[in-house]
Amino acid sequence: SLLKDMMGRGPQNMQVCVEVAKKYHEELGSEELVQVFESNRATEGLYYYLGAVVNVSEDAFVHFKYIQASCMLGQFKEAERVCRDSNIYVPEEVKEYLKGAKLPDPRPLIHVCDRFDFVDELTEYLYLNSLLQYIEVYVTKVSPTKTPNVVGKLFDLGANEDFIKRILMAVGTACPVEELV
């Protein structure tokens, strides 16, 4: 309740609140602390608190809330890092959040979908949201071996054949041909 009181008095106390949360997060509990930051609309404070504990936390809630706070503050590289490197979050929950957030940079979503085999959903999301360049990035830089899945989904979605040919040309020999036939 001391943190609630301090945050309620204005943003000038945020740094102190973040330091208290970092120091006593095990005693106070992550869910309680997140609730305090969120109820005071202190997304930046939440981001800094969670950023200090996410790399040592085994709590999926902490990882999810950190991805969420990173996205809300436009820290897409940080969201991407956690989506790519963490094994702690719930993939379905993070995927649904990222799809709903409609980020201008879908790389966090690309990593979640690639790691946990949501390739059809990723392809559909990128295609329907006109993020075609990211489909090409996905198959050329992230996961060329999943090109057959992507191409199949693009055909199902009625994608332009020239676009599909361009993707296949860009991937070249990295694409497993036997799966395309």
Image (cartoon, rainbow, N blue to C red):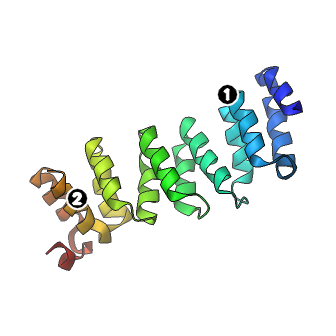
Disc 1 to disc 2: CB gap under 8 Å: no
Assign the C terminus to one quadrant of the image: bottom left
Q: Which labelled disc corresponds to residue 91?
A: none
Q: Is 125 on the left-hand or right-hand side of 172?
A: right
Question: Quick check: can you spot residue 103?
Answer: no
Mark 2: give few (<14), some (14-19) or many (20+) Cα within 10 Å: some
Residue 60 drawn at (x, y percent) = 64, 56
Count the labels in the image.
2
What amino acid is at disc 2?
Lys
Mark 1 vs 2, N-terminal side = 1
**Residue at (52% x, 44% y) in the render:** 76
**Which residue lies under the disc numbered 1?**
41
Residue 105 drawn at (x, y percent) = 42, 43
Callout 2: helix, strand or loop?
Answer: helix
Whole-angstrom CA distance, mark 1 to mark 2, is 40 Å
**Which residue lies under the disc numbered 2?**
153
**Residue at (35% x, 66% y) in the render:** 143
Callout 1: helix, strand or loop?
Answer: loop
Residue 69 drawn at (x, y percent) = 61, 40
